[in-house]
Amino acid sequence: MDRRKFVTAIAGGMAYYGSRPVFTQNSRLGTTRTLNIGTAGGFQLGFKSYPKSFHLNAKELILTFDDGPKPGPTNAVLKALRDEQVLATFFLIGQNAVANPDLVKRIAAEGHTIGTHSNTHPMTMRDLRETTAKTDIEVGIQNISKIMENTTLAPFFRYPGFGDTPALNTWLGSRNIGVFGTDIWASDWITMTPDAQLSLLMKRIRSAGRGMVLLHDIRQQTADMMPDFLRQLKTEGYKIVHMVAGNSPAQFQDAPPNWSSETDRFLNKRSTHKTWPISTPFEDSSYD
């Protein structure tokens, strides 16, 4: 497929067959624009963890997926994205990539950006010795790079559970690797129906108005939600921005006054209670 055709956003409506809408080619969500992101010197961004994020226009979203690949749900997510001509970023786990190399190649071949998410997904790297954490990150990068062959692996990294440390951030920056948190999450590590997940995620997107969205392509509920999710974004006028590795410094915006790291609050709670708060949507206010 011609990449230029694939990334073109196509405006339009829908046809009807009887009383059921049929989404025609002209009704696809599409990918509106591409951000070429330079990572020289590194950075840390995403308002859930850091006091800055990408500068995006109103109703612009960046879609990202963690923890894959996993054959069933990842293939379904890729089909949903392809059907709507949407490009996303996948932060892959090294050992999952090694187990599913053809799926890694499919993600790259369909035009998506691939970053890394460690080799074994330790929860979290704050609990590891620094040398152990660095090795896990490095092996993940090496394993995925070998599979991708002639396709470029983006110097984009996301910590498992967002568990960074200042030393690891400095080390990644010295290697010109950007660190990605997120602005909006689906809480899809919690078991819920696709409809409930769609309702929760759309509520958060409407509240934020723009931003980087975190989902997990290893979750079947997310895969099942994706077609309706992408159509709902189209219906409500949201635009998709695709990020790729480049040479230009990215434009950032600062967090609002009185910002604090939501992930730090939960990671500190975990450190105290020795449990990971996976039974909640990882928000201050339950499902609201």
Image (cartoon, rainbow, N blue to C red):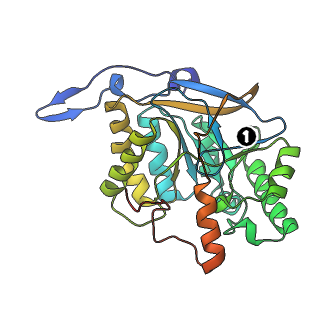
On the image, which quarter does residue 269 sit in? bottom right
In the image, 59 versus 226, the foreground residue is 59
Relative depth, front residue between 74 and 217: 217
**Image x and y of residue 148, in percent:** 72, 45
The answer to whether residue 14 shows anywhere in this view is yes
Tell me which residue sits at (83%, 41%) in the image: 176
> Can residue 67 be seen in this snapshot?
no
Q: Is residue 150 above or below residue 50?
A: above
Q: How many marks?
A: 1
Q: Amino acid at mark 1?
A: Ala
Q: Looking at the image, which is closer to me, 77 or 32? A: 32
Seen at 73% across and 52% down, the residue is 144
Answer with the quarter of the image where residue 265 lies: bottom right
Q: Which residue is mark 1?
A: 154
- The residue carrying pointer 1 sits among few (fewer than 14), some (14 to 19) or many (20 or more) residues within 10 Å by Cα, namely many
Find residue 119 and report its horizontal and vertical position in percent.
73, 62
Is residue 85 shown left or right of residue 43?
left
On the picture, is 117 further left or further right than 145? left
- Quarter of the figure with the N terminus: top right
Q: From this view, report whether residue 183 is shown above or below residue 136.
A: above
